[in-house]
Image (cartoon, rainbow, N blue to C red):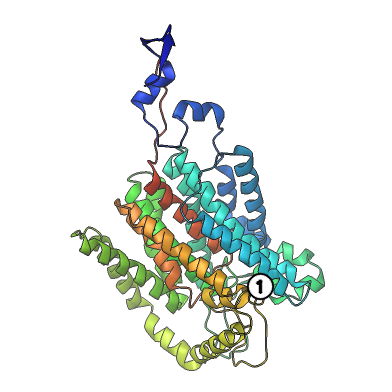
Amino acid sequence: MARTVVRGRRTARASAPARARAVAPVEPGVLEPGAWAVRQAKLPVWPIVGMFALLPLWWGLGLFYIAWPLFGAVLLSLLTSRGNIRLPTGTVLWLIFLGIVTVSATRLSYVTNLIIFGLRLGHLVTGLLVGIYVYNLIRDGVPWTKVANPLAIFWLSMVALGWLGVLLPTFSFPSPFELVLPHGVQAERYILDITHLDSTEFNKFSRNPIYRPAAPYPYTNNWGTAYSFLVPFVLAYLTSVRRGPMRIVLLVSLPLSLVPAFLTLNRGMFIGLGAGVAYLLFREVMRGRVRLLLPVVGIVLIGWIVTLFIPVFDLITNRTSSTDTTSDRFDLYVQTWAAVVHSPLLGFGQPNSVDTTHASEPLGTQGMIWQLLYSHGIPATICFYLLLLVIARRLAAAVTPSGLWLSALPVIAAIVTPFYSYIDPNMSVLFFALGLGLAAVDGPVNRIPKEVPA
């Protein structure tokens, strides 16, 4: 304990900051609470509220995908002006990954491709910034519920829009942003997809189309990816927060979400969630604990009841038997890998359409691993998987029920990569939840240092 020194002798009187440190010890390398409060302003919560809680607004304007990188710029500005930012596990790997992705822009065929490339790069950067921002909010002592509520509202909005696809499957409308776009930009398929308002995704050339909920995303697979990331978060919220209106709403929304989730017919979503649950159960059994069995059994039971009213497996079988989706995907994967062999270090910058595959989708789509390999090369892909591995190893230290649910996210994120890509707002959804988990593992949460009287 630091004391004042008078004529070479220590006095018995300790300074007020010293007494404060004695009552509330701080972590190594971090300013004591009093000094931090004086020298550092806390980060505001409103940017993540604007991003995640206002999802219906951004979707209705056609700005859902466009606004995300702009919010990323806001987060970066606030982080840099604040200074002394704590960096969560894996940040260096992610920066290396972003560096390789940026250099891969040299492989683009046309200058006009830079628009879409820049948008996707913006989503990757924003994902990292969201994770860092949430991590620092929690480490600064901002209450867990205050930080997590925007993502909970995002979940509720996604479930509501999923029900829009169930009740109004043919809903389709040009967004205000789409209407003001130049015709040349509208001609880009990707831009049109992310700005047009559709409640479902379906084959427009089919005589008997299958309408699969997609809103607020342009593609059903994106909705399924978000669902697989958000279910563990919702379970973490419910096990962490014991009272309040948000808890009640989430409890009601979870079983309601099964209807649009099942109607997406997303096999990869089921596989990802199943792998995450299996991972958690294996860890718990190896530690001699079975406390997760009860909620898992409850979720499975509710899911089984829903299948009594929605013939999910019959619908999936009908879809795969009436289309060539599996064979088309396999042909796309084979030709994607054949192209990667010719540019293994930096890829080709972004997916490209070719006329040599049976599938209508461009090379480098239909899966995160294929998009990374084709667009940015093998080194970038290795960095991405190493990042998930490092985060999974860190989150394995979680012991609380909420921490355990969040620790399944890196596993789910890795398992869905052969099926779905998430270089879009889902990257921010994933890193938002990971930021919550990493902050809980690295330090206390919901703890605001109290002033110690002098």
Residue 79 falls in image quadrant:
top right
Vertical arrangement, residue 78 with respect to residue 399, above or below: above
Say which of 132 and 300 sits in front: 132
Say which of 181 and 110 sits in front: 110
Residue 65 in view, yes or no:
no
Quadrant of image for the N terminus = top left
Horizontally, residue 297 falls left or right of residue 223, namely left
Quadrant of image for the C terminus = top left
Say which of 13 and 38 sits in front: 13
Horizontally, residue 186 falls left or right of residue 155, namely right
Vertical arrangement, residue 82 with respect to residue 377, above or below: above
User: In the image, what residue occupies the spot 40% across and 39% down?
Assistant: 446
Look at label 1 and name its amino acid: Asp
Residue 395 falls in image quadrant:
bottom left
Give the structural element (helix, strand or loop) at label 1. Answer: helix
User: In the image, what residue occupies the spot 21% across and 63% down?
Assistant: 286
Residue 343 in percent (x, y) is at: 63, 80
Vertical arrangement, residue 142 with respect to residue 290, above or below: above
Residue 105 in percent (x, y) is at: 70, 69
Residue 47 in percent (x, y) is at: 59, 46
Residue 447 in view, yes or no:
yes
Mark 1 is surrounded, within 10 Å at the Cα level, by few (under 14), some (14 to 19) or many (20 or more) other residues, namely some
Residue closest to the far front: 8
The residue to which callout 1 is attached is 193
Residue closest to the far top: 7
